[in-house]
Amino acid sequence: MNEPLLSARGVHKTYLLGKRTLEVLRGVDLELGRGDFLALRGASGAGKSTLLYMLGGLDSPNQGEIRLAGRNLATLSRRELARLRTKEVGFIFQAYYLLPELDALENVCLPARMARTPAAQAEARGRELLARVGLEERMEHKPYELSGGEQQRVAIARAMINEPDLILADEPTGNLDSHTGEEIIDLLVALRAEKQTTLIIATHDARVAARAPKVIELVDGQIAAGG
């Protein structure tokens, strides 16, 4: 039996807010193979973003284990985690997080440069991806010169440039109108299918979740029955 690309076992996450303890995740189990597409549903505050960040090595659980491509993330050094996030995980956020001083192409190429890809190779790949997401004529535009939908397309190209095994998208349509949001999901689904990338989309939108063959719902920090 093939080992799953990503697994979480008994994951708990608790934050201390002054004297108050906030329990965000309470024993989450999850397993995904290569090429799987999962929608992670839940209301605001259900723990979707927290779980996504831990699956990608941006945060760590207080209890439980997360493994990516056979490696226990808790055993990796900070440098090893940074290398993993750069090369093997692509992040797409609701707020885009593009660097305002860089143009679209430079933003897309940044993770490749961090992975020490030769400049010419990174630029060629960046141009290819921006053309693929429909921004062939906007490569030299700064983020403030782009619409919200265009900025999210840049973010998608940036997430894909190192050809990661895993894409984590946190409410990728949350700042977009419904029509633009549908276009973004169409694009993500198409790119995932081309590369057989594992994709997790955290969303509160039932229409977005309906696009995924696998859907689970987080309720009060736990996967709802039947999820």
Image: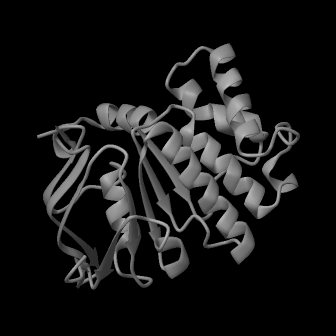
Residue 60: image quadrant is: bottom left
Q: Answer left or right for 71 relative to 113.
A: left
Residue 77: % across, % down: 24, 35
Which quadrant: the N terminus? top left
**Foreground residue among 166 and 60:** 166
Write the residue at 44% across / 83% down: 44
**Where's residue 100, x and y in %?**
75, 48
Q: Does residue 96 appear in the picture of this structure?
A: no
Type of colouring: one colour
Spot occupied by residue 202 in the image (x, y as percentages of width and height): 44, 68
Which residue is pictured at 83% across the width and 46% down the height?
A: 142
The answer to whether residue 210 is left or right of residue 135 is: left
> Count the marks: how many?
0
> In the image, 43: left or right of 119?
left
Residue under the image location 66 percent in, 68 percent down = 182
- Residue 179 in the image: above or below residue 137: below
- Answer above or below: position of 170 versus 167: below
In the displayed structure, does residue 169 sit left or right of residue 7?
right
Q: Quadrant of residue 119?
A: top right
Could you tell me residue 198's position as x and y percent? 39, 48
> In this view of the protein, can residue 94 be seen by the observer?
yes
Quadrant including the C terminus? bottom left
